[in-house]
Amino acid sequence: MAILVTGGAGFIGSNFVLEWLGCGSEPVVVLDKLTYAGNLENLAAIRGDERFTFAHGDIADQARVAGLLREHAIRAVVNFAAESHVDRSIHGPAEFIQTNVVGTLQLLEAVRAFWGGLPAGPKEAFRFLHVSTDEVYGSLGADDPAFTEEHLYQPNSPYSASKAASDHLVRAYHHTYGLPVLTTNCSNNYGPYHFPEKLVPLMILNALGGKALPVYGDGRNVRDWLYVTDHCSAIRRVLEAGQLGRTYNIGGRNEKTNLEVVQTLCSILDAVSPRAGGGSYWEQVQFVKDRPGHDRRYAIDASRMENELGWLPSETFETGIRKTVEWYLANPEWVLGVTSGAYRDWVDKQYGS
Ligand code: NAD
Ligand code: DAU
């Protein structure tokens, strides 16, 4: 018996796999297409571990998924695989539809066929956990209550629309076929192995590299930040005790404007790695053109996770963000590995010179 983790070479997936093997003995199979965002170096610490199998492949490849489910007697699938960057979805939505919608459909089909053929006990115990996002709920006004699981789906970007579509497919497979599914909708993550196209790692690395810190619009958009290992512990808890067919909102109750996040990062860096020429990293901030359709505010009401499953995050924003900065400072080789070639092309396309 083992679990199958799709997208396990990406940011959250790799943190999940490292933690899974760190806190238990059950084997894990990672299926990952190794797109620009997938990186086997994220899993270097478990290379050679006999409980770990890596399979290079696409969730849209039904035959490949079917083979893995059979060969490894999979008892649960945790689906992280996705195109995940909003700005990229604005430049090119097609890949998002292909992986997030078509890919999820093909994955569900392979899982449904496998699950349908299981004997009663393993069939009842089987789980399909779909990892989704708070962005499916759309944008909140400054005084609106945080998103609950009952909030309407109102996705605003091609990325969030594709994730919303995948959530609906997962829901439909439960309702129509009885597939034992669970869905999690989480807020913004940050932490180790975060690809530096996203706000937190981009700001850390640009600051250290003496580059501009590009803040979109007025910088007052609000995100609800959660340290990545707290997201992983929440997923483990939902997998263990979540009610079938139910969705769970995961968040850290850490609402911050983007300016607050950048300010915090600059202050930590000023203290732990001061600028060679003096002055604060904050001087590198540049306000740039806003993201089209930029959602103003996300906030998660995590009451269901807290009350029904007894889950709470371990990190505050202050402890998590400090650990994150320290991780990037301690891992220059990882940074070098992900900021070459294709990454530079993306930065030119998104930010110009
Ligand atoms: P990521 O972009 O860092 O990683 C995605 C991984 O999926 C990569 O390893 C990539 O190679 C793989 N992948 C992409 N297409 C694939 C395909 N067709 N078949 C197999 N593998 C494929 O993303 P992330 O930030 O780790 O996010 C993981 C999941 O969590 C996504 O579903 C995302 O929507 C969701 N999520 C992310 C956040 C966040 O703040 N990053 C918050 C909530 C939910
Ligand atoms: O809310 C969960 C979502 O969080 C996940 O579903 C997505 O996969 C993940 O990428 C993240 O989406 P965001 O768009 O919120 O994250 P991003 O890091 O791209 O941007 C965070 C905020 O910072 C957002 O308001 C845009 C702003 N931003 C981002 C970048 C990259 C900037 O101001 N400048 C930048 O250069």
Image: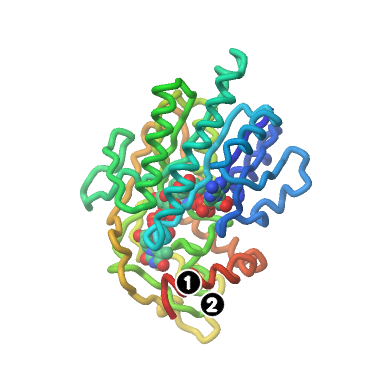
Instruction: State left or right for residue 38 relative to residue 21.
Output: left
* x and y percentages locating residue 288 in the rendered image: 33, 74
Residue at image location 52% in from the left, 86% down from the top: 277
Identify the residue at horizontal 67%, vertical 41% (top origin): 22
Quarter-of-image position of residue 165: top left
Q: Position of residue 257 (x, y in %)?
A: 33, 60
- The structure's colour scheme is rainbow
The spot of residue 196 in percent (x, y) is 52, 64
Q: For residue 289, which numbered disc appears in the image? A: none
Residue 281 in percent (x, y) is at 45, 76
Q: Left or right of 309: which side holds 332? A: right
Viewer-closest of 291 and 94: 94
Residue farthest top in this picture? 120
Q: Is residue 100 visible?
A: yes
Q: Is mark 1 within 8 Å of ligand 2?
A: no
Neighbor class of circle 2 (other Cα within 10 Å; few <14, some 14-19, many 20+) is few
Q: Please name the residue that numbered disc 2 is placed on.
A: 209
Question: What residue is pinned by disc 1?
Answer: 347
**Image height check: is 124 above or below 294?**
above
Q: Give the Cα distance between marks 1 and 2.
A: 14 Å
Amino acid found under the numbered disc labelled 2: Gly
Image point (50%, 25%), residue name:
241
- Disc 2 is placed on an element classified as loop
Q: Which image quarter is the C terminus in? A: bottom left
Total marks placed: 2
Q: Are marks 1 and 2 in contact (CB under 8 Å)?
A: no
- Residue placed most toward the observer, 96 or 340: 96
